[in-house]
Amino acid sequence: MADGIFRNVTTETVEEPKVESKTPDVDGEAEVETPYTEYEGDYVADYFKLGNKLDVFADELTVIDEYIDELIDSGKIANSTKAVEKILKDMEKFTNIKDEERSVIRIEVISAYIDFLNKTDQARKDFGKYN
């Protein structure tokens, strides 16, 4: 029996990786996006960088604001400034004025486009009545 070989059992210990818990830097203020309907001032005027020329474009701004409010009320877009910015950029892209630097042209074209959309929506509603 002296010829027997005894083997020693070796167990490997696996060290668990250390995970450092990173605490976010908190300075007491949370960055919360302002809803479009609660935005101080006129977001569309700020988007087009009008400054103090609001009364010159009052009709166009009213058309754009009413259309955006209608989209928010119907639930088609979220009540956030990011969603409004996205819809305005999409309109600029669709009307081929995204590279236009003059705010006057951009506001006029967007307002005319919204008038067109409102008229086609009304025509669809009227057509549904008589069909």
Image (cartoon, helix red, strand yellow):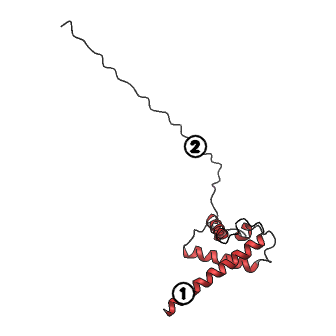
In the rendered image, which residue does mark 1 sit on? 125
Rendering quarter of residue 52: bottom right
In the rendered image, which residue does mark 2 sit on? 23
In this view, the mark in front (2 or 1)? 1
Asked whether, in this view, residue 11 is left or right of residue 1, the answer is right
The magenta stretch spans residue 26:
yes
Q: Quadrant of the N terminus?
A: top left
The magenta stretch spans residue 82:
no
Amino acid type assigned to the residue bearing label 1 in the image? Lys
Rendering quarter of residue 44: bottom right
> Magenta stretch mostly in which secondary structure?
loop
Crowding around mark 1 (Cα neighbors within 10 Å: few <14, some 14 to 19, many 20+) is few
Q: Residue at x 63, y 48 (%)?
A: 26
Q: Earlier in the sequence, mark 2 or mark 1?
A: 2
Front residue of this view, candidates 20 and 89: 89
The residue tagged with tag 2: helix, strand or loop?
loop
In magenta, the rendered stretch is 22-31
How far apart marks 2 and 1 lie (CA) works out to 55 Å
Asked whether, in this view, residue 102 is left or right of residue 17, the answer is right
Q: Position of residue 53 (x, y in %)?
A: 81, 73
